[in-house]
Image (tube, rainbow, N blue to C red):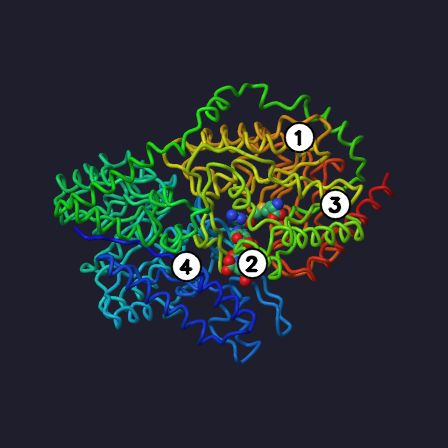
Amino acid sequence: MLKNNLGYPRIGSRRELKKACEAYWAGKISQTELLETGRQIRLHNWQLQQQAGIDLIPSNDFSLYDHVLDLSLTVGAIPARYQEILNANPQNNSLDVYFAMARGYQKEGLDIKALEMTKWYDTNYHYLVPEFTKNQTFSLSSDKIFNEFDEAKSAGILTKPVLLGPVSYLLLGKEKEADFHRLELLPRLLSVYYDIIERLTQQGAVWIQFDEPCLALDLSYKEKDALRTAYGTIRTRFPQLKIMLATYFDGLRDNLLVASLLPVCTLHVDLVRFPSQFENLLTAIHEPMSLSLGVVDGRNIWKNDYTRSLTFIQKAIDKLGEARVMIAPSCSLLHTPCDLELEKDETRLPSEIKQWMAFAKQKLQEINDLYLIATQGNDAKWAQNKADIESRRRSPLIHKPHVKQRIDALSEADTQRKSPFSTRQHLQKAFLQLPTFPTTTIGSFPQTDAIRQLRARYKSGEISPQHYEEIIENHTKEAIKWQEEIGLDVLVHGEFERNDMVEYFGELLEGYAFTQNGWVQSYGSRCVKPPIIYGDIERPHPMTVRWATYAQSLTSKPVKGMLTGPITILQWSFVRDDQARSETMFQLALAIRDEVLDLEKAGIRIIQIDEAALREGLPLRKSDRQAYLDHSVKAFRVASSAVADQTQIHTHMCYSEFNDIIESIAEMDADVITIETSRSQMELLEAFYTFNYPNEIGPGVYDIHSPRVPSVEEMVQLLEKALAVLPADHLWVNPDCGLKTRRWPETERALKNMVQAAQHVRETINEEV
Ligand SMILES: Nc1nc2c(c(=O)[nH]1)N[C@@H](CNc1ccc(C(=O)N[C@@H](CCC(=O)N[C@@H](CCC(=O)N[C@@H](CCC(=O)O)C(=O)O)C(=O)O)C(=O)O)cc1)CN2
Ligand code: MET
Ligand SMILES: [Zn+2]
């Protein structure tokens, strides 16, 4: 019985990779130094896994930015526009091309946009979307996978290289020309996979892991056929190769038959997300296929329940024999923080709660423990685990009957605004007195190094809360003054006091613990520290009123109260696995509802409740979606409905594909929604138009993910496009998302241009009238 790992976090336990990348981009360290940091992280990770007794240790799971981008480079799917980078400067090499694809390139007279970035399935990880053309060719164009295999080999570790499978890779990409489907490229792509496999086997690789997460989605006949072709031909060419096919994030369900008939040695399945597939799997797979049991949760931080996992392991052994069973995490450990032992702050993570948890490093140990218990009957380890699991189950920290009662007592009336939107709209227009095409921003202003350092010093006790608050007040004051000067209509306080839009609320709510070092990669060098929901949620004190009222006291223009909504807080936290997600979502909704009412009472006239993660949390399988959407809509309405008609509720969503959820967005009944649309040139508005979306909309007129400053004309054009499909009195003017990752100089220029664009459109409309 082998112990199998699918992937390990690559940021380094102290975010060494983030720091090295950012220093390299800033020109502070050389390419050699950056690559050396990567090498050290890989070596450390491999040795860690070896020491933990893992048999199948992955390589090529490391990435300087993103593993999908790595594959695009490996197979030579590099859009033509990036070739210019090599000509622009003789010193440029393939790493410059790589980072240009990730981040765009604005030097040496070039202005090349980055590849589109989007969500990796239902996670908060983002990948760079491959671009395909009809005549797309592929050729082996990077040595990364070979070099990393050799690197591990020289350290005495024979690894299992990991590759995103050809079908999932194609499906994750986008056609950049009409008249073809990207799956048609499969034969050409496969020939590069053959080259890769050939060379890896020459280097001594025995196992190769192909990740096909698409097997957890609803697949068409054509897609299933592509999987049969891909693995059928790989098998024919490489009869000796040990192929591991990994699926995760949901069950195989109706893809079970296809998967079980593929000619692969091992099928890896996610038994955390979809345990009920287990019995069917045992009957479906036949000799000599083996099963890798994903029993240790790769998406959460709770200790594994050994008793439960051992039931799976034992049954699998009974049916298949030990040699055909492997123990594994449910998916790559990329989505968990590195090392629980770095958490030493009792006030953030009390030891009672810490003892219920396991991060990536501890999860490796769990795999080894399960192996030892299953094969050698290590009863001491099992008994200890039972005690830990029982301690969590019985802890008085978790359950608060009055919170549960409040949820049971929720009625239909708690989810309804007092009047329908048309009535509210009149009242709000009279109350707020805004011009047509009101201008606003999404909430955050640049989080400068100075602010982050200040907060770090405050959190370490080096500076007093008074001193910290005074400086944050100064930033807020400056931001209000500046917004008034440039003529924005609805202001924001800037979110300077927040580390992150979810972690901030986690720190202020009861039922939450948080970490010092529990970083998880979100995209490139950007990481998040998801707070941990361990118990019933309560809001002991108002969370944002102090900053909202301070900002409002400085101006007569409306300042938006700024909250993160229940769906998004849930999605971006580590959540309880001892109750339904919807239950936790309603607890969060009640906490936000109380905050909304406190903001209103304090004189805040507009309240924005961000639901950036609504689309991301959508279940991967269609059959699960309606239930999720129903709960989500209800939770948002519980959070937002208690206010008076004249109080205006905004929501914001980013990175979204809205077509399939537009009805639910309308049911949320926010008075105004601001959304990301600029990259798709307002294409996204089609859903709102076709559906006849009833409420007001602020389609983003500029992309905040790039430092590029959009011109007035560009934004006027986008607004005109929006006006072609939306009523003028429903339209707001704003950027795509918050500005926290930007710097001030570009932010100032871009927002001044945006205000001018709105003025221009107002004038032309008046002339027409
Ligand atoms: N949770 C979440 N998910 C999200 C988003 C989001 O905003 N939040 N946005 C979308 C895109 N994803 C994003 C993810 C992260 C960041 C981001 O800016 N992350 C920051 C960290 C933010 C943070 O938590 N900052 C803390 C800690 C900052 C820090 O690194 N402090 C230093 C010390 C200060 C210094 O010397 O700079 C340290 O601890 O070592 C703070 O401000 O307090 C980063 O990686 O750099 C942006 C977008 C989708 N998913
Ligand atoms: C990722 S959505 C961000 C919303 C938040 N209010 C901000 O402006 O940063
Ligand atoms: Zn956003």
Front-lying residue, 265 or 263:
265
Q: Which residue is mark 3?
A: 439
The amino acid sitting under disc 2 is Glu
Of circles 1 and 4, which is in front? Answer: 4
The amino acid sitting under disc 1 is Pro
**Residue 244 vertical position relative to residue 432 in the rendered view, above or below:** below
Q: Residue at x 63, y 33 (%)?
A: 596
Classify mark 3 as within 8 Å of ligand 2 or not, answering yes or no: no
Q: Is residue 136 left or right of residue 59?
A: right
Q: Who comes first in sequence, dot 1 or dot 2?
A: 2
Q: Is residue 649 visible?
A: yes
Q: Which residue is mark 1?
A: 694
In what element is the residue under mark 3? loop
Q: Which residue is mark 4?
A: 67
Q: Who comes first in sequence, dot 3 or dot 4?
A: 4
Q: Residue at x 40, y 56 (%)?
A: 185
Q: Residue 434's quadrant in the figure?
A: top right
Q: How many marks?
A: 4
In what element is the residue under mark 4? helix
Q: CA distance from mark 1 to mark 2?
A: 51 Å
